[in-house]
Image: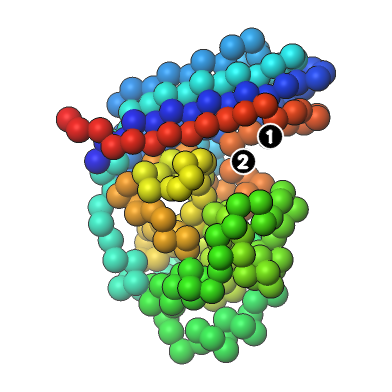
């Protein structure tokens, strides 16, 4: 499947500020970037940094006045259709070092707080079947509410409130999976079925020797999704991180399917 992607960011920068931008679709890992352009306007491009595992490439900028970033890309998604529910968990002693990192607690995913709940609710299940049941539980009990959370909201808050947006669903999914000793990480993505269109976040779980996307919101399919970046939680994958105060003016994202 080929996706036509566009993203536009517009922010006011009252004073000189360092910025980290992560809005470019990754090339590889089940997708190929066929064509792409990034117009940053006035801010100075300082450096591109290869992320661990090559999944994303953050851009360091320094700007003052206004940031207007315009990204356009055509991405071919050739990710195979996989029923993750049928996959086995990898024994802990056989996990690669790159996956072990995602067994541990992180800022927004305090997985140690969920052990009792996971044992009680999903204790009899294994591997992908357990992950699938967790995903279904979240989707059936949470309400998607724009503005219900903020940058300080973590998985435990969302678990109690039973509502949130994509990042909150993903944080809870990740915390539950890690609590069951299955590596889980967060991915920022562009996806076809997101409504309203915006940057989207999903969980990825490590089963049967590979990473598999799991969207507890139920809005997206892996075969219609272009990954941007992966990390432990939202702190690692933010599309824009500013190291001083900035002011939001506007932003937009569109994802469309194209033929040929």
Drawn side of residue 30 relative to residue 237, left or right: left
Quarter occupied by the N terminus: top left
**Residue in the image at 46% along x and 89% along y:** 124
Distance, label 1 to label 2, CA atoms, is 6 Å
Drawn side of residue 45 relative to residue 224, left or right: right
Foreground pick, 238 / 59:
238
Q: Quadrant of residue 78?
A: top left
Rendering coords of residue 166 (x, y %): 54, 54
Drawn side of residue 208 relative to residue 105, left or right: left
How many marks overall? 2
Rendering coords of residue 200 (x, y %): 50, 46
Foreground pick, 46 / 218:
218
Labels 1 & 2 near each other (Cβ < 8 A): yes
Quarter occupied by the C terminus: top left
Rendering coords of residue 232 (x, y %): 60, 53
Drawn side of residue 189 relative to residue 30, left or right: right
Foreground pick, 127 / 168:
168
Q: Is residue 68 above or below residue 99?
A: above
Residue beneath disc 1: 241
Tell me if residue 113 can be seen.
yes
**Residue in the image at 62% along x and 41% along y:** 238
Q: Secondary structure at mark 2?
A: loop
**Residue in the image at 50% along x and 84% along y:** 122
Residue 214: image tag: none
Residue beneath disc 2: 238
**Residue in the image at 52% along x and 50% along y:** 201
Rendering coords of residue 95 (x, y %): 47, 64
Q: Secondary structure at mark 1?
A: strand
């Amino acid at each position: 499947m080929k996706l036509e992607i566009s993203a536009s960011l517009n922010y006011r920068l009252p004073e000189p500020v360092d910025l980290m931008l992560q809005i470019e679709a990754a090339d590889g890992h089940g997708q190929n970037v066929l064509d792409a352009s990034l117009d940053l306007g006035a801010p100075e491009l300082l450096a591109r940094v290869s992320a661990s595992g090559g999944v994303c490439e953050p851009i360091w900028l320094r700007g003052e006045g206004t940031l207007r970033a315009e990204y356009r890309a055509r991405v071919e998604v050739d990710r195979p259709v996989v029923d993750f529910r049928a996959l086995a968990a990898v024994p802990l002693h056989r996990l690669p070092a790159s996956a072990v990192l995602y067994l541990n607690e992180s800022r927004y995913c305090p997985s140690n707080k969920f052990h009792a709940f996971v044992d009680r609710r999903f204790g009899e299940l294994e591997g992908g079947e357990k992950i699938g049941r967790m995903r279904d539980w979240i989707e059936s009990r949470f309400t998607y509410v724009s503005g219900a959370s903020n940058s300080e909201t973590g998985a435990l808050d969302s678990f109690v409130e039973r509502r949130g947006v994509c990042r909150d669903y993903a944080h809870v999914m990740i915390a539950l999976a890690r609590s069951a000793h299955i590596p889980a990480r967060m991915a920022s993505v562009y996806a076809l079925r997101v409504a309203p269109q915006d940057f989207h976040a999903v969980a990825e779980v490590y089963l049967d020797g590979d990473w598999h996307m799991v969207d507890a919101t139920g809005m997206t399919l892996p075969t219609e999704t272009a990954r941007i970046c992966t990390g432990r939680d939202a702190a690692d994958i933010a599309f824009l991180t500013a190291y001083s105060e900035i002011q939001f003016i506007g932003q937009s994202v569109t994802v469309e399917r194209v033929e040929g």
